[in-house]
Image: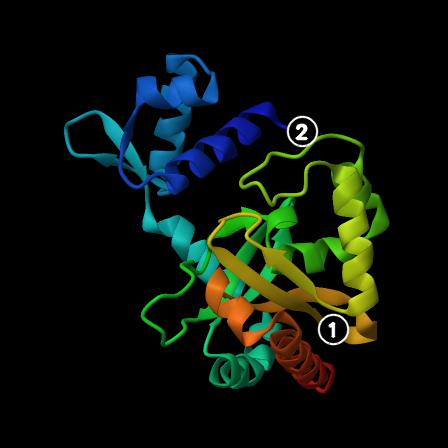
Amino acid sequence: MNNTLVKGLQLLEVLSARDGAAGISELAAELRLGRSNVHRLLQALVELGYVAKDGERGSYRASLKIWELGARALQRLDFREAAAPAMRHLLAQSNETVHLSVLSGEEVVYIDKLDSPEPVRAYSTIGGRAPAYCVATGKVLLAWRDEPAASSLLSARPLHAYTPSTAPDTAALALALERVRRQGFAVNRGEWRASVWGIASPLRGAGGRVIAALGISGPAERIRKKGVRDLARLVVDAAALASTRLAGQ
């Protein structure tokens, strides 16, 4: 693998995750690279249009060209259109925020969402990421992930605990994923953010392959009051509807 390419992509990821611009010294420290190396990478990315220099302060920020690439990629994801009616139906029935997610490494990426009309609701953004083993859509995608890819995550090791409810290690996660496969849906009981619960089910494409996850999330107390089992039935039915539409494309 080209080392310069890897470093350049890592630099882009760091810049795109920041709310504002960053200087060379700051970026070099975060990436553990030399200042001259970071400067050369930045100059190349500026020339290509992926990075913009922020005035005369000597700092840099990611440009909109990254967003443009992502937007074009999203347009090619046909299952977003197939899932849209099911997402609207699920929102109307549950009154909770609805997410459509895909797996990227060990994280989920939210590729579409519909916000709950409730004044207190789960916060997320399209393009946002979350640790897959902590959220319902992520656990669904891990449960039906290809075995060779899944083995890297499930190799015996502890897991970072975001809340007291996070799975402590990969052995516990493996048991949880087996339960997800048996029941056909996953539940997140405050495993990433203590106050937010979620429920998700798989979206299947041609041949029954799981290609995305459809789910809801909301304040823990409201999800408990409505009932996990009742909400899970709504989520499973919505995911089945979206899968049927996708199979008919």
Say left or right for 45 vs 84: left
Please tell me the numbered disc located at residue 205. Answer: 1
Image coordinates for residue 125, horizontal then vertical, percent: 41, 58
Say left or right for 149 vs 80: right
Q: Nearer the viewer, residue 157 or 113?
A: 157
Image coordinates for residue 218, horizontal then vertical, percent: 47, 65
Earlier in the chain: of badge 1 and badge 2, it is 2
| Badge 2 element | loop
Q: Is residue 91 above or below residue 179?
A: below
Under mark 1, the amino acid is Gly
Image coordinates for residue 13, horizontal then vertical, percent: 46, 38
Under mark 2, the amino acid is Met
Image coordinates for residue 4, horizontal then vertical, percent: 54, 25
Residue 85: tell me if it is visible. yes
Q: Nearer the viewer, residue 50 or 206?
A: 206
Q: Residue at x 16, y 34 (%)?
A: 55
Q: Nearer the viewer, residue 223 or 203?
A: 223
| Badge 1 element | loop
Q: Residue at x 29, y 29 (%)?
A: 22
Could you classify mark 1 by the number of other residues whose Cα lies within 10 Å: few (under 14), some (14-19), or many (20 or more)? some
Q: Is residue 70 above or below residue 202?
A: above
Q: Nearer the viewer, residue 107 or 75?
A: 107
Residue under circle 2?
1
- Here the colouring is rainbow
